[in-house]
Image: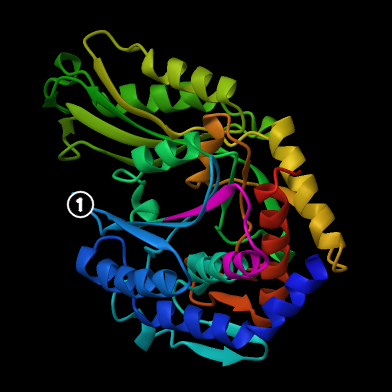
Amino acid sequence: MTRKLLDYCIGNQDWLLELIETLVEIESPSDDPAAVNRCGAELASRLDASGGEITRIPSSTAGDHLRASFGSGPRQILLLGHFDTVWPVGQLTRMPLRRDAGRLHGPGVFDMKAGIGLATLATRAVLDQGLAGCRIVMLWTTDEEIGSGTSRAVIEAEAKKSDAVLVFEPSLPGGVLKTSRKGVGQFEITAHGVSAHAGLDPGKGVSAVRELARQIIAIDDLQDPANGVTVTAGVIHGGTRANVVPAEAHAIIDARANTRADAERIERTIKSLQPHLPGARLEVTGGFDRPPLERTPAVVKLFETAKAVAADIGVTLQEGSAGGGSDGNFTAALGVPTLDGIGAVGDGAHALHEHVVIDALAPRAAIIAGLLARLTRGGS
């Protein structure tokens, strides 16, 4: 079966490349809803032509999210990703779409318009073989790169209906799938003190900068890199002039953890911080907005199924962990088996050398199609 799917994907590689290149040429930065919707209109047209039932889901601040449903039945498999990118309109003039030395270059090609193409070709391949009692639902969102604020509820609602979720974020180097991702949190700590003249009346002041410095040292003790826990003060500012005891100081903290337990511990500790200096006051806001994607037995089982499918065509699949979050973090936190990084093989997400490996596209699509075939039949 998988070899037949591989033949189908190889035979349709030119179709796949044309779809990917078309999507890349319609630039779609997260903060430009009109541009995102232009890309979405083209994508909706292609999915409709592939047999999908299309629903546009309006967003108050981003472009319209797209849902495409294929087949019918009581069971559902969710294919998840986004078509917004980090690149502004006009980036194509600095990063032109081009094929060079077996690579397809362009802004957003790796993260993650090639993944959308792979999902579409794989779905077409499975539809060609016939679906029984199961529908494939694609959900392509428009604000993943800026936090998924308007799409999270939609993602979670679709995930709750699904037996499994495949996330078409790009792979780790060499095509490695992602069976775990760190949870990601952001906190802002504001220290309030009392201003005073630094020369004439320093004793009447309470330094917010000094208070903040003590807090940063305290939260640094939360670090446990060996177990995937990192806490980083990435932005710090405070004070007005060198000769004024500062009355206010701020720090933005990035926090990451491999497990929900560690994420909850970090959030609880940071939110319970108390002032060190008499007369100082603290405000703490924020939290973990993306829970960890943990490597549960259900996730491992899904990966092993994909690995077995890949072996049928002579491809060795491996698994790994990612330090950044994706929308797969949301679905995994609901207990739905989630396999991430099943998108394109390449390199350079968010970087000027962004590209995908052309020769890896058809085999990748065949693996996805084979996995879909097993999942839609209820196998694993």
User: At numbered mark 1, what does the secondary structure look like: helix, strand or loop?
Assistant: loop
Left or right of 248 on screen, residue 165: right
Question: Looking at the figure, which quarter contains the C terminus?
Answer: top right
Along the viewing direction, whichever of 204 and 26 lies nearer the viewer: 26
Give the residue type at disc 1: Thr
Side of 204 relative to 274 (left or right): left
Q: At 85% across and 68% down in the image, what residue appears?
A: 313
Q: Whole-percent x and y of residue 285?
A: 29, 26
Give the magenta part as a residue range: 123-139
Q: Can residue 82 be seen in this view?
A: yes
Q: Where is residue 346 in the image (x, y as percent from the top left)?
A: 63, 71
Q: Does the magenta stretch include residue 128?
A: yes
Residue drawn at 37 percent across, 63 percent down: 84
Q: Please tell me which residue is depicted at 74% across the width and 31% down the height of the picture.
A: 297
Left or right: 198 in relation to 2: left
Residue bearing mark 1? 61
